[in-house]
Amino acid sequence: MKAVVAALLSTAAAVAAIPPGIPSGWEARSLLSSLFIAEPVDKGDYDRDLFPHWEAVEGNCNAREYVLRRDGNNVETGNDCYPTSGTWTSPFDGATHSVPSDVSIDHLVPLKNAWISGASQWTTSERKMFANDVEGPQLWAVTSRVNSDKGSSTPDEWRPPLSDIHCDYAAAWIVVKAAYGLTVSSAEHSALDEMLDSC
C-alpha cells in the first residue's frame, strides 16, 4: 500500500504545470471562428529586439524568472528571483528538469509569427507587453531542446510531441491571437480546428 501511495505521489509531482487563462475546447472553437484569416506578411524586417523581453514583471522577477517560479514544483529563489532549487516538468514532452538552464520559456505564439501577423503595426510598448505577458497563456516553461525544435513554427508546421497537450496548446494559441488581435493563416486555422477535436 505504501508503495502505491508513493508511486501516486511521485506521479503527481511530475505533472506539468500549464499557464493560466486557457479556455475550454468549446470556448476556443468559438474564438477561432472570430479570428481574421490572412496570410502572414513577411517583409524580412523582423528582429527579436523589437520585442523587449524578459522585463521586470514583479519586484525583482523578470518574466522568465516569474514563469520558472510559477510553473515549477517546490521552487526556491534567491534575492534576485533566480531559482536556486526546484523541478520543472515540460508540458510539451513530459520531461522533468531540476536545472533552470535546461528549461526555456516559450513564447507560445512566437515573436516572429506575431510580427508577421499584425504586431509589426504595434508600438514598442505593446510588443513589450506581449513578450512579457505572464497573465495569460503566452509563456510556457518547456524543455529547451523542444523549444528550439519549435522555433517560430505555427501549429500547421509543428505540434508538441505529447498529443495529450494538443487541446490546451491549440486553445491557448487561439486565445492569445484573439486577445492581441493577431491574424491566422488558412493553414494555421485548419490545424487549430483539427487540434480542438482532441478536447
Image (cartoon, rainbow, N blue to C red):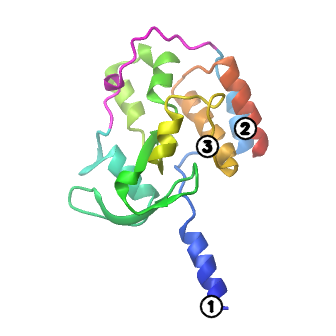
> At x 54% / y 23%, what residue is drawn?
181
The Cα atoms of the two marked residues, 1 and 2, are separated by 39 Å
Part of the protein shown in magenta: 38-53
Query: Would residue 63 be seen by someone viewing this image from the given angle?
Result: yes
Locate residue 3, reporting x and y percent. 63, 87
Q: Residue 195 carries which label?
A: 2
Residue type at numbered disc 3: Pro
Going by the picture, which residue comes out furthest to the top? 43
| SS under mark 2 | helix
Say which of 2 and 168 sits in front. Answer: 2
The quadrant of the image that shows the N terminus is: bottom right
Crowd class of label 3 (few under 14; some 14 to 19; many from 20; radius 10 Å): some
Residue type at numbered disc 1: Lys
> At x 39% / y 66%, what residue is drawn?
86
Q: In this view, does 86 lie to the left or right of 155?
A: left
Q: Residue 160 carries which label?
A: 3
The Cα atoms of the two marked residues, 1 and 3, are separated by 34 Å
Q: In this view, does 54 lie to the left or right of 112?
A: left
| 43 within the magenta span | yes
> At x 47% / y 45%, what residue is drawn?
145
